[in-house]
Image (cartoon, rainbow, N blue to C red):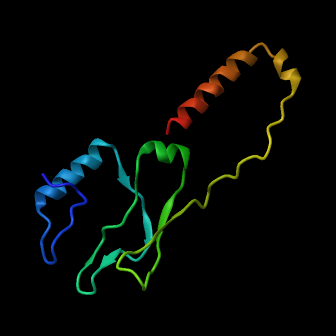
Amino acid sequence: MQPFTQRREEGEKIQSAELISFAKCLEDCELQEVKSIGTFFTWTNRSTWSKIDTMVANSRWYQEIEYTHISCITEEFSDHTPLKINFPGCPKRRDHFKFCEIWCNDPKYKEIVQMQSQKRRKRNKM
């Protein structure tokens, strides 16, 4: 089986077994194509047009970054179309965390801190 990124000679056709293998890999890795706006075809040699440039993401991506889409930017000087990742609904980070000592008096203080710490560790593994 050939690697997915194999170079082809001009006019050489993609074999259906390659597409099936690639689709299975995406499925096994639980990856889905991120929706894009703009031109559908992302590569051309001026006689053939194809969609070969794309972004894939898993469910974890969408849990962490709720709304994402790709803009296909029209490029006149390359045979590939640059992709721009957009995060229109992405919340801005807070500048500073302020700790109030009175929180330590809450009976559930340690439990809450441990729970949030575990959540943060899981997010950072992405």
Seen at 40% across and 75% down, the residue is 81
Seen at 59% across and 25% down, the residue is 118
Taking 44 as reference, is 98 above or below it?
above
Judge left or right: residue 81 versus residue 84: left
Taking 111 as reference, is 74 above or below it?
below
- Asked whether residue 41 is in view, the answer is no
Seen at 65% across and 20% down, the residue is 114
Seen at 23% across and 57% down, the residue is 4
Q: Residue 80 lies in what quarter of the image?
A: bottom left
Taking 102 as reference, is 18 above or below it?
below
Judge left or right: residue 29 versus residue 12: right
Q: Residue 49 lies in what quarter of the image?
A: bottom left
- Asked whether residue 104 is in view, the answer is yes
The extreme top residue here reads: 107
Q: How many marks?
A: 0
Q: Residue 23 at x, y = what percent?
A: 23, 52
Judge left or right: residue 110 versus residue 71: right
Judge left or right: residue 19 versus residue 43: left
Q: Which residue is more in the foreground, 62 or 117?
A: 117
Q: Residue 45 at x, y = what percent?
A: 27, 82
Q: Residue 55 lies in what quarter of the image?
A: bottom left
Q: Residue 5 at x, y = what percent?
A: 25, 60
